[in-house]
Image (cartoon, rainbow, N blue to C red):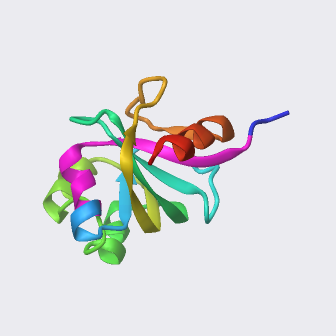
Amino acid sequence: MEKEIKGVTHPIPTEYAERIYKKGKTVFVGKSHLGRVSKGDKFIIYESHGAKAYTGWADIIQVVKMKPADILKKYEDQLMVTSEEFKEYSKGRNDMNVIEFENFQLFNKKVVPKRFIAIGGKYIYEDEFKMIEKNKG
């Protein structure tokens, strides 16, 4: 039986993660598309520097592939990166993965994953989801 996907995580440098916590940014853009999540699943923030842990989560509104120009047009003010950072990051890409989310919740306690989170991100299955839920304080 296939394990149920409850969310998705991508490594995010602390300075960008803080833009979610402090500036209310609600759109993550990445190069790898993990599209097997649905509206209402969790987007789990993994801080790749500093904490090296899950530090919060939010409800996914949608996960879509879009052209960089369209992403800037639609989401410029909501992106967790600046326009300049985005232009540099998206150079040479035909399309990018967009995760739009809401209801961000910062954890009281950081939750360290069992395994390293690769740059491409990963799905969070039910067992790990429950571990995070139990330990987030």
Q: In what quadrant of the picture does the N terminus appear?
A: top right
> Which percent across, then down, holds residue 54?
40, 42
60 relative to 121, above or below: below
Which segment is the magenta one? Answer: 4-20
Q: Residue at x 45, y 38 (%)?
A: 121
Q: Where, by quadrant of the figure, is residue 76 drawn?
A: bottom left
Outermost residue, front direction? 137
Q: Residue at x 22, y 56 (%)?
A: 18
> Which percent across, then down, holds residue 122?
52, 37
Position of residue 89 in the picture relative to residue 54 (left or right): left
Position of residue 34 in the picture relative to residue 20 (left or right): right
Decide whether residue 85 is among the magenta residues: no
6 relative to 28, above or below: above
Q: Where, by quadrant of the figure, is residue 50 drawn?
A: top left
Outermost residue, left direction? 84
Position of residue 131 in the picture relative to residue 67 (left or right): right
Q: Residue at x 37, y 70 (%)?
A: 70
